[in-house]
Amino acid sequence: MAPLVSISGLRVAFDGTHVLHGIDLDIDKGEALGLVGESGSGKSVTWLAALGLLPAKAKVSGSAKLEGHELIAADGKLLDQVRGRRIAMIFQDPASALNPVLTIRRQLCESLALHRGLRGEAARTEALRLLDLVGIPDATRRLSAYPHEFSGGQVQRIMIAMALAGQPDLLIADEPTTALDATIQAQILDLLSAVRREFNMAMVLISHDLGVVAENCDRVCVMYAGRIIERAPATRLFDDPWHPYAQGLIGALPPLDGARRRLRAIPGTVPDPRALPRGCAFAPRCTFAGDHCHAGVPPLAPLDQDRAVACLQPQRLPVELAAE
Amino acid sequence: MLRYFAIRLSRALLTIALVVTFAFIVLRLSGDPALMIMGPEAPPEVIAAFRKAWGLDHPIWVQYLDYFKAIGQGELGRSMRDGRPAIQLVLERIPATLALTIPAFLVKVLLGIPAGIYAALHRGSAIDRGVMITAVAGFTVPSFVLALLLVLIFAVQLGWLPSGGQDSWRHAILPIVTLGFGGAAVLARFTRSAMLEILGQPYIRTASAKGVPWRRVITDHALPNAAIPTVTILGFMVGSLIAGAVVVESVFSWPGVGRLLVVAVANRDLAVVQCILLLVAITMVTSNLIVDFLYGLLDPRLRSKGAEA
């Protein structure tokens, strides 16, 4: 089966500084993919670049195809038909992601008019149905309210309703719960899973929270300094991470069962994109790094039929042992 | 809501009272109208008679109370020069001033706002830099310098337009251009920065991500937000319709309120100056009230805050 979206060799530079160094990524129909990594690792930039949403000063090269149609440097008309209609996106800070001076109705009906040609009463009925679907109580009355009259969790629900308005094939959820408190976070993630199943929609869940990704995704890509460094099915990544960075991330999670232990932090910090090390970007922080790690950038090499890792000496040891 | 407006209104009245008080005191401390109007050679008894006739022989606080009492009765005093009611002198001049300031206001809006929007949308382009250089020139060059420059070019060198007076519509062109250009510059810079700030907001990215065409992102999502800060400047410009042309009227010998003010101050024609300042304060305060009201219309967040207050 041909992938729904196929990204290859995607590079992005701002003012001559490369922040994305060739991303290769396929998303299948209906699949849930997690993108994990620290802030600045290029998770969001990948998708903003694919949808042409980066500021004009960003230099984007490479390819991002939606069912064979090239999106990079595509003309505005094509992108307008893809955005919201085929690929929808929701963002981290729901409070500032909705236009403060327009009613919810206007913002929802705008999408419905653009992508489904619904106007007037038909659009209103559909908007109500969507608000109901995402769990906004008393939707009839609240349709004429403004974003500031809703709580953060409710605004994110409205954002999801807006994303669903175009009946997209793929939803990019960019840190959708980071700005919300823990209980609301769980509700929003449940909602995302539920609508994904109902609409048979693919989803990319961008998060720095491994737990969030583990529970909601089939596959996970771990990103570091503008590259994918490990790709694996979610369960296998958490049971047995190969890349030392992925091991570090998982080692830093508190265990739910077993004895309590001190959480381990990864030493050092993310390198400055303006001054990346010559070899593997993680090598300066890596306990296993040898001389050859500093010599060249390791490619993302498939080591298994559904796993790939960008490391010259992937640690096949279990997490507990590897960290000793 | 009623309480909110009551507070605003009493604050507005207080502002007017303060302006008038300040003008009253400064005018009386800065020179003797009797000497100014009758001349330094006038015999002392004539001066004394003049002072008595205008109540200037009373202590300043008595004059002040009398003045406020008179205002309460709608009496704004008479000109010390020709004895006519000050308000009549001022009202006669208002049409001439508005004949300059209203077209100039239109120039500011029609030139400044589109230029600012265009510059913001093409940030860093040659046109953006051109607009910004012109705008900086427009509000750093004092209006009298610009006025003299225009006179030099269009009246003296080219001979296309008259350099002063009020005989025909052609006389109004240079004063209107002078006034309009400076204001358009301010408005262009302000609109540009407001627009740039809005374009960087996450909800603009959301609108694009929804598939809204860029043109409509600008008109439907960015402009309604950018209008909020721009209205502040527009309010200020409306407020200065009456007395915003003092310098330009003087340079072009245009018989408006501004020139009346200059002459009246020079002569210490107290009632006329006070009358003009009262009028200016009232227009400023009124346009501020209108701006507050417009904020509420444009920004639903303020509307609900207003309702709570």
Image: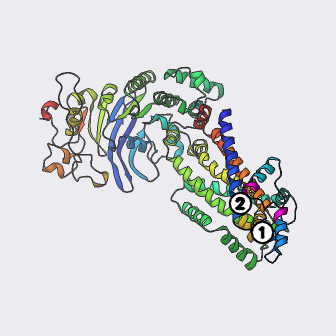
Q: Is residue B56 magenta?
A: yes
For the residue carrying disc 2, how many other residues have a C-alpha within 10 Å: few (<14), some (14-19), or many (20+)? Answer: many
Instruction: Report the quarter where the C terminus of chain B lies.
Output: top right
Closest to the observer, A125 or A183: A183
Closest to the observer, B45 or B223: B45
Which mark is drawn over residue B42? none
Q: Is residue B171 above or below residue A289?
A: below
Q: Amino acid at mark 1?
A: Asn
Q: Position of residue B170 (x, y in %)?
A: 81, 68
Judging from the image, mark 2 belongs to the subunit labelled B
**In the image, which residues are magenta?**
B51-63
Instruction: Report the quarter where the N terminus of chain B lies.
Output: top right
Judging from the image, mark 1 belongs to the subunit labelled B
Q: Is residue A57 left or right of residue B211?
A: left
Q: Position of residue A107 (x, y in %)?
A: 57, 33
Q: Is residue B56 left or right of residue B116?
A: right
Q: Position of residue A30 (x, y in %)?
A: 39, 27
Residue that mark 1 sits on: B267
Point 59% across, 48% down: residue: B229
* Circle 2/circle 1 CB separation < 8 Å: no
Point 17% across, 28% down: residue: A261
Point 88% across, 61% down: residue: B84
Q: Is residue A1 above or below residue B248?
A: above
Q: Amino acid at mark 2?
A: Gly
Q: Of marks 2 and 1, which one's residue comes earlier in the chain?
A: 2
Q: Is residue B171 magenta?
A: no
Q: Secondary structure at mark 2?
A: loop
Residue that mark 2 sits on: B244
Closest to the observer, A66 or B76: B76
Query: Can residue B65 be spotted in the picture?
Result: yes
